[in-house]
Amino acid sequence: MTLQISGLTSGYGRSSVLQGVDLDVPDGRVLGLLGRNGVGKTTLIHTVMGLVRPTGGSITLDGEELAGRRSDQVARAGLALVPQGRRIWPNLDVTEHLDLASRRGGGAGIWTVPKILELLPRLGERRNHLGGQLSGGEQQMLAIARALLTGPRMLLMDEPSDGLAPTIVDQIGGVIGTLKEQGVTVLLVEQDLHLAFLVADKIAVMVKGQIAHRCSTADFRADEPTARRLLGVA
Amino acid sequence: MTEWFADNFVSILNGLAIGSLLFILAVGLSLVFGMMDVLNLGHGALYLIGAYVGYQFTGGVSSWGGFLTALGVAAAFGLVAGLILSVATEPLVGRGHLDQALLTLGVALVVAEVISIIFGDDVQNVVAPPGLNESIQVFGNTYPAYRLALIGVGAVLAVAVWLVIEKTSLGALIRASVSDREMVSAVGVDNRKVKAGVFAFGSMLAALAGVLGGPVYGARTGLDETVLLLALVVIVIGGLGSVRGALIGSLVIGQVESLGRANFPDFASFMLFGALALVLIVRPRGLFGSKVGAG
């Protein structure tokens, strides 16, 4: 499943955030998208998912044009979102989340509820708890489960490490690693370099609404001056 | 205390009857507003249509056939009107409440005027069906049987709606839409269909409320504005998008209206908005508001 983004522009009201993004995520790979706060990473994810309307450019999934479609159409075309802040429905229990996600959606659903519970056993233990009663890590697992159950060809993950303890971040990394082994394509937005380096094959860096740099994860780790210049970190 | 209770027993029953009717009216308005952020000021007009359908089909005669026909016709009318309103407001989703208020209020004004042209401005009676069209003794008080039946119908509907919302997968979809509809869309559900379904269901209940309220309040011009105002107060007090909130809000407003008018007739209107102001000061999201910072 190749996602190709070219010349994508988008924003909120009169402020334009994406200034012509060109990016492609190859089939079966994990692309880590890095960048400082406010460079447009979440806007990019939301635009690809159809939650923000693009003002120009194109987004294709295996040649199928997605730009300008509603998010439910994008979901049925095979993209699934693990959003920033997890956005679990607080007044639905875990089972209801899983049912709602698997009842709809379109892709070639290789992910079933039993398979999900094997991957994320903690969710099975918390089956009857409301989304709002779960810990941050459990909510993140549920957000991943919800996305997988829609039968996606590709996952968009927006800062899954956000606000979680390091041990939980490692668990999330393990889950993404398992998904990768199973051939799931992932566009991973991360501030946590440790997690990005752990799972990503390739790295792209966003600066001011555009992709400023692309390379393999190994090259990026070796090139500390570039990392420091683009991200302001070591 | 017991003496006060005995003195006010009839008022309390009246409050329960008003509360039941308000719940049937307000629950749909609350779900559509809470879920899709669409403010439908045409909700009162749907009640008005129901009231005149009740008048038309009972024709001033007490009959079960006429009353049940009226309920069926009003339900069908409400479903269709709800679908039309849902489609009409679709381009206005996310465009601010003023645009939605202008459109739906405009529709409501046209409907009220058309009804006034057809039926005139006189107050019309809707007659309760046989058996309910009389008074009975309740703990030594004479009380209209129809109002007791109305309390019963309200209770049954409240339980039914609660069960659907809390215990079914359809209800889960509606609850999810109330708390974060973007994420519902992101799992592949077309929001517009959910909105149309809830809009149609809520509008059907509003039109049914018009028929059910007929034997108590009759059918007259201006009733649409009165009930819309009460329904808005109920959902502000109860919290948007919450069935439990709509129920509690309805029961509170029912008692405030009834006990307030009976005990402090000069301040009845003040008490309604006093209760509203009090809730807004203490809990700005309403007693059971479900909007708990989505995102």
Image (cartoon, coloured by chain):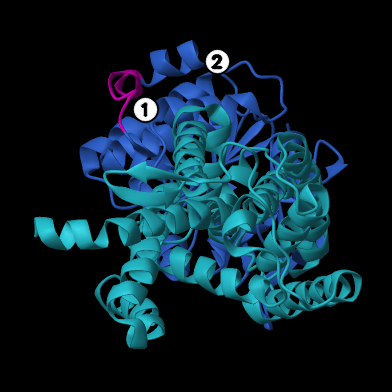
Q: Is residue B94 left or right of residue B179?
A: right
* Closer-to-camera residue (B63/B55): B63
Tag 2: Cα neighbours inside 10 Å, few (<14), some, or many (≥20)?
some
Q: Which residue is mark 1?
A: A174
Identify the secondary structure beneath mark 2. Answer: loop
User: Which part of the image, by quadrant, shows the N terminus of chain A?
Assistant: top right
- The answer to whether residue A214 is above or below residue A17 is above
User: Chain ID for label 1?
Assistant: A
Mark 1 residue type: Gly
Numbered badge on residue A47: none
Marked residue nearer the N-terminal end (2 or 1): 2
Q: Residue furthest left?
A: B1
Colour assigned to chain B in the rendering is: cyan
The picture places residue B6, in percent across and down from the top left corner, at 19, 56
Q: Is residue A123 magenta?
A: yes
Q: Chain of mark 2?
A: A
Residue at 59% x, 44% y is B184
From the viewer's perspective, is the residue at label 2 or at label 1 nearer? 2
The residue segment tinted magenta is A121-129
Pick the front one: B262 or A46: B262
Tag 2: residue type? Thr
Write down the colour of chain A: blue
Residue A90 belongs to the span the image colors magenta: no
Which quadrant of the rendered structure holds the C terminus of chain A? bottom left
For label 1, the crowd category at 10 Å Cα-Cα, with few meaning under 14, some 14 to 19 and many 20 or more, is some
Q: Are marks 2 and 1 in contact (CB under 8 Å)?
A: no
Up-down: is B122 above or below B148?
below
Picture quadrant where residue B187 is located: top right
Residue B219 visible at all: yes
